[in-house]
Image (tube, rainbow, N blue to C red):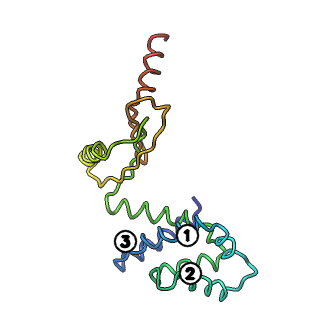
Amino acid sequence: MTDFSLNYGKAIYDLSCEENLSEVILNDFNLISELLCENPEYINLLDTPTISKEEKGKLLDEVFENRIHEYTLNFLKILSEKKSVYRFEKCKNVFVKSYNKDNKIENVTAVTAKPLSDEYKEKLVSKLIAMTGKNIVLENTVDSSCLGGIIIRFENSQIDGSLKTKLENLKKHIFA
C-alpha cells in the first residue's frame, strides 16, 4: 500500500471520527466503491490530466451531490485533483481497517464444500464472537476441493479443519 493511500485513508478516517461521521462516510465509501466497480472508465475520466479541475468537480457533483456527505465528496475531489481516483479502493481499505479495529469488527471467511445453512452460520458466528470478543462479519465461500469440514480465515490467521487437510496430514504421517 502506498504512503499516499495510507495517509489519505487515515486522514479521512480521523476526520470522520472527529465529526462523529465514520459510519456515514463508510456507507458513502461503499456506495462509491460499487459505482466505480460498475463503471471503471469513470476512474480514468476523473484521473485524466486534460480535464480541468472545475470540470472534474462538476462531474463529481452531478453524480454524488446530495447522495454522499460533503466531506466524502470533497475527498473524491481531492483525489481527482491529484489524478489519484484510481487509489480510492486502497484509501477505502485503510478507512475500513481503522473502522473495524475501533469498532471491534472481525471479517471472517468460512470455506466449506457446500454452502452453510443459516442455522450453522448463526452458531459459528456465536462461537467466533465468544472466541474473539469481536463482532463477526461472516462470509461463506464454497470450495468443493475442501471435501468436508471447514476452513476459517481471519485477517491474520487460519483454522483449517477441512477433511482434505486431515487426509493430507494422515498421508504424510503414514508415508513419512
Amino acid, disc 2 = Val
Helix, strand or loop status at disc 3: helix
Q: Is residue 62 above or below residue 10?
A: below
Residue highlighted by disc 3: 23
Residue corresponding to mark 2: 63
Q: Position of residue 125 (x, y in %)?
A: 29, 47
Q: Is 135 left, or right, of 80 in this rendering?
A: left
Please name the residue shown 49% across and 61% down the image. Answer: 93
Number of numbered labels in the structure image: 3
Q: Position of residue 168 (x, y in %)?
A: 47, 21
Picture quarter containing residue 16?
bottom left
Percent position (x, y) of residue 59?
A: 62, 83
Q: Nearer the viewer, mark 3 or mark 1?
A: 1
Q: Secondary structure at mark 2?
A: helix
**142 up-or-down from 78: above or below:** above
Q: Are marks 1 and 2 in contact (CB under 8 Å)?
A: yes
N-terminal of the two: label 3 or label 1? Answer: 3
Labelled disc at residue 56: none
Taking 55 as reference, is 118 left or right? left
Q: In the rendered image, which residue does mark 1 sit on?
A: 35
Classify 2 as above or below 173: below
Image coordinates for residue 119, horizontal then vertical, percent: 27, 45
With 138 as the anchor, is 143 left or right in this view? right
Residue shown at 47% from the left, 67% from the top: 30
Hey, what amino acid is under mark 1? Leu
Q: Residues within 10 Å of mark 1 (few under 14, many from 20)?
A: few
